[in-house]
Image: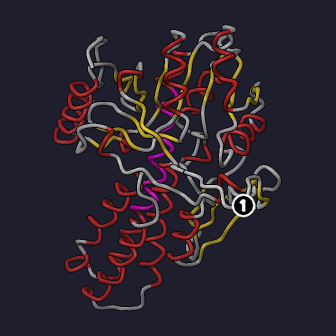
Amino acid sequence: MKFKTIEWKGDRVRMLDQRKLPQEVQYLDCRNASSVAQAIRTMAIRGAPAIGVAAAMGIALAATKTRSSHPRAFAEAVAKVCREMRETRPTAVNLFWAVDRMEKVLERVESDGVEEAKKRLVREALQILETDIEVNHRIGKHGKKLIKAGDGVLTHCNAGALATGGFGTALGVIYAARDEGKQFQVFVDETRPMLQGCRLTAWELVQEKIPATLITDNMAGVLMRKGLIDLVVVGADRIAGNGDTANKIGTYGLAVLAKSHGIPFYVAAPTSTLDLSLVSGEEIPIEERSVAEVTHFCGTPIAPKGVKAFNPAFDVTPHSLIHGIITEKGIIRKPFRKNLRKMFAISNLRRERFQTVPYRARDSEED
């Protein structure tokens, strides 16, 4: 990648301000945890894995700047920042997963001491970043086989390097297929109301010199009917235990269209996006953002004054519409509930025995 989404700079967290793209490439230096939290809330940084990394770095930054040398006072100060990070955005589970990891490190402050706890928290945040990049590449490796030479691939919102620590999930699949020498066409829908497809995904693909065509959100069905789309690959913000997937608003509509036209629909996400505590997508909290994002465009009103608007940031795609979930451990197929738990059981066994056990889920038409 020719850019870095987020970096640890010791006394600050530097992130690419995605609100400015594509007009200008501008970096934002966050010198305290509150400015990191604000960057997450205002979508200066966005994408489930990326905001998980940002939250972890914000906590580490707060730890390094906390002056108290008393373990209990230090722990209370950092715990307060952890709570602040949890309250930034409710849907993406990666954020909560990252905060959980940081809190686990914080639990050892009484035995480690404050200075050692600070070092451990910084190391944990950096490991979350490094692991995310590695995981993205593995997702790409598993998913690239789904793309054939000459295919038309449709993606939604932005699930690329900008949405992660680097490389990307859905776009990681596209990058990996490109790196293998395959020639294909990518279609990018604009993704109203914040235009992440138009502003961010199209920008990434131009940077990488990958052939891409931008379409409006209401064009997808026509392209599918004309036979121009062979595969749909999207990212995810949270995946329930049955495979139901929360992703950027508009994903569900694309899945319905893909199903109607017999086009495979895949979700690409790290296992940190899985939330097996949820029985189904009905339990996933859906963030509602300011209606001004719908009624205004680049600060200019585009709707009559006084009109009501509705602005959920995400929707939930039922598992029945999803062909498979591309993870760093392989492509998980139906029955999702059974195979997701099987994957986690194997992962836990691997950690216990310190050995590599590759996961291979079998195809099934069950849900």
Horizontal side, residue 272 vs residue 197: left or right: left
Q: Is residue 124 above or below residue 264?
A: below
Query: Relative to the observer, which residue lies in front, 330 or 298?
Result: 298
Query: Going 59% across and 77% down the picture, which residue do you hit?
Result: 31
> How many residues crowd around disc 1 within 10 Å: few (fewer than 14), some, or many (20 or more)?
few
Query: Relative to the observer, which residue lies in front, 171 or 360?
Result: 171
Q: Is residue 18 above or below residue 169?
A: below
Task: Measuring from the top left, give residue 104's x and y in whole percent.
Answer: 26, 64
Query: Relative to the observer, which residue lies in front, 200 or 284?
Result: 284
Task: Measuring from the top left, give residue 173's x and y in whole percent.
Answer: 56, 27
Q: Is residue 229 above or below residue 139?
A: above
Is 42 a magenta residue?
no
Horizontal side, residue 310 vs residue 96: left or right: right
When asked about the image quadrant of residue 233, the answer is: top right
Q: Quadrant of the C terminus?
A: top left
Q: Quadrant of the N terminus?
A: top right
Task: Measuring from the top left, give residue 74's x and y in whole percent.
Answer: 32, 85
Is 126 a magenta residue?
yes
Horizontal side, residue 162 vs residue 329: left or right: right
Query: Going 24% across and 28% down the picture, which residue do you hit?
Result: 337
Which residue type does callout 1 highlight? Lys
Query: Going 41% across and 63% down the picture, which residue do you hit?
Result: 123
Q: Is residue 116 visible?
A: no
The residue that label 1 is drawn on is 305
Task: Measuring from the top left, give residue 77's x and y in whole percent.
Answer: 35, 83
Q: SS for tag 1? A: loop
Query: Going 48% across and 40% down the picture, which residue do you hit?
Result: 247
Q: Is residue 94 visible?
A: yes
Q: Main secondary structure of the magenta part?
A: helix
Q: Is residue 111 above or below residue 209?
A: below
Specify the segment rendered in magenta. 124-140
